[in-house]
Image: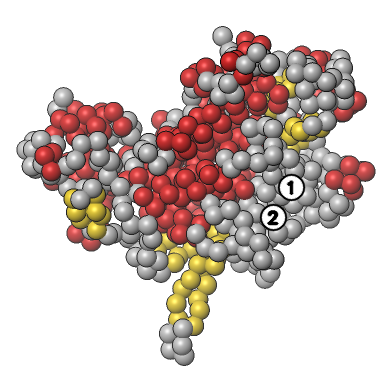
Amino acid sequence: MSAIYLLRRFSTKPPSRFHRNLFFSTFSKESSPPPDLSRTTRTIFTQRFAPSSISFFPQSKIPPNRREFSTSVETNPTDKSFERIHVQSGVIVEMIHKKEEEEEETVSRVNVESTGERKALREESEAEKEAWRILENAIVRYCGSPVGTVAANDPGDKTPLNYDQVFIRDFVPSALAFLLKGEGDIVRNFLLHTLQLQSWEKTVDCYSPGQGLMPASFKVRTVALDENTTEEVLDPDFGESAIGRVAPVDSGLWWIILLRAYGKITGDFSLQERIDVQTGIKLIMNLCLADGFDMFPTLLVTDGSCMIDRRMGIHGHPLEIQSLFYSALRCSREMLSVNDSSKNLVRAINNRLSALSFHIREYYWVDIKKINEIYRYKTEEYSTDATNKFNIYPEQIPPWLMDWIPEQGGYLLGNLQPAHMDFRFFSLGNFWSIVSSLGTPKQNEAILNLMEAKWDDIIGNMPLKICYPALEYDDWRIITGSDPKNTPWSYHNSGSWPTLLWQFTLACMKMGRPKLAEKALALAEKRLMADRWPEYYDTRSGKFIGKQSRLYQTWTVAGFLTSKLLLANPEMASLLFWEEDYELQDICACGLRKSDRKKCSRVAAKTQILVR
């Protein structure tokens, strides 16, 4: 297999680990790169196939079964390009310095060349041009390097509160827009600097949460060292300053998801293989997989621990957290190096993936058949073979749902815990369940069928409802505590959030239905620029700009741009979602099959949730 063939084969698609190993097994016997490679091509090979940016060296000097990792645990905040000397299993390999490679700057973007070419062929609309200007103006710099984007950048806003900070969840669509445009430096810097913040001390009233907790946001501040000297520092918020003092459970999950996306799009897998990054993944996973009192594989969280960061009755096991958790588990299994120190964690990840997948597919799924089953539930069943395992009372089925659910559609519940089902439709959780293949292919298709059938309810005049329907009257007063910001059909209480467009787009593209995403995007494009890119919209149909909505909201802008880029580059979109993992369905970690006392409930239910 020639070097030129491998280069052409993977010029726009990241090589698998098999092909990277094939490349090194083919050419590493030589003390220099293959002679048929030009200097530029040689650099591309080094960046595309090497696990890190390393020079070629004789195979005899490399210990067998070795993976290239950075042994540096800390990153110097003033080190703008993160260059350093790596010690790799006794072999010192000097990283290629950026300044020495300025003439080959474009080579590092070989994986998104086709993206740029396609973008050049497609003329940008005025809304896209303005969106890019706003996004670039929102960039935050630390020690001269870009490290993220502020949440909102409204020049007329005199009281920005924390909207002038870089939020991890908010930056994800911005990061994807930059990556799809071929600008990876800001994403790499963001991932490394937020990783540094993971180890900071986090204390509220003399109590510290788990070591792996990622901050919700951070701000670049300038502090005086003396009368003549100042220094820039990163000031993180782990929830100790947030409304309600809630820890951001989703931050670490989004960080892992973005780390995988960075590697997939840029082809730079050296970042995820660094020892400090591997350690960060392990800390987040250990925090999520810690033993507790819960009987279910889902993550137990408080209200306000995700995008819905105010009291909205989502405490318990909200779908949004479970779908992100499932994605982070799959990302971690893909990126973690398996060795003696990580094999137990990888085993725990596999077990949780299997249990979580079964639990969500079996117990969270709702369609007209399932509703009729719940309607006929018997209660107070005391048995290991109970049908109504969670003791759900049929009276919990809300009247609106009976007529709302379409014949050919369905969705995943918003929440499930003992004696409680939250029948609201939550957009982010359902979209990300499609993207991550948490739902079965048949369930994923049914979710989009429901979206199409209930377009006026969930899309309306502005995509997309964060949840449906709104809490009203006594429900609003009791569940939200009469929150004046979460009034019915506003903000988190069924407001319309344009940033959800990119996740909807990705879900539609995965299921082969991009026309749905194009229709929603065209609807948004008609208004967003004229309305000055609001954070959210109010009313049942999303007709009015939100009463407390920030303008020039960065993730509104980024969600729009990312949707445009994904639709224009379907081969890039395919790098960001997961296909069905059929091996997971054959794993049963509970061990109950070997016991005479109990019978595993998965055996009976398996035929119901697997798609033929």
Q: Nearer the viewer, residue 261 or 346?
A: 346
| Crowd tier of the residue under label 2, counting other residues whose Cα lies within 10 Å: few below 14, some 14–19, many 20 or above | many
Q: Secondary structure at mark 1?
A: loop
Residue 455's tag is none
**What label does residue 303 carry, if any?**
1
Residue 249 x, y percent position in the rendering: 62, 48
Residue 441 horizontal/vertical position (percent): 57, 19
Which residue is found at the position 45% from the left and 77% from the top?
231
**Residue type for callout 2:** Val
Q: Residue furthest bottom?
A: 227
Q: Quadrant of residue 205?
A: bottom right
Give x and y (percent) for residue 576: 47, 35
Relative horizontal placement of residue 398, taking residue 45 as reference (left or right): right
Asked whether, in this view, residue 370 is left or right of residue 211, the answer is: right
Q: Are marks 2 and 1 in contact (CB under 8 Å)?
A: yes
Q: Quadrant of residue 185?
A: bottom left
Report the front residue among 583 and 126.
583
Pick out the residue farthest to the right. Answer: 474
Image mark for residue 246 = 2
Q: In the image, what residue type sits under mark 1? A: Asp
Q: Residue at x 83, y 25 (%)?
A: 391
Disc 1 residue crowd, few under 14, some 14–19, many 20+, Cα 10 Å: some
330 left or right, relative to 340: right
**Residue 146: which quarter of the image?**
bottom left
Most foreground residue, 390 or 371? 390
* Quarter containing the C terminus: top right
Q: Is residue 505 visible?
A: no
Q: Where is residue 497 shown, x and y percent of the image?
A: 67, 44
Identify the residue at image location x=53%, y=52%: 212
- State whether residue 454 appears in this view: yes
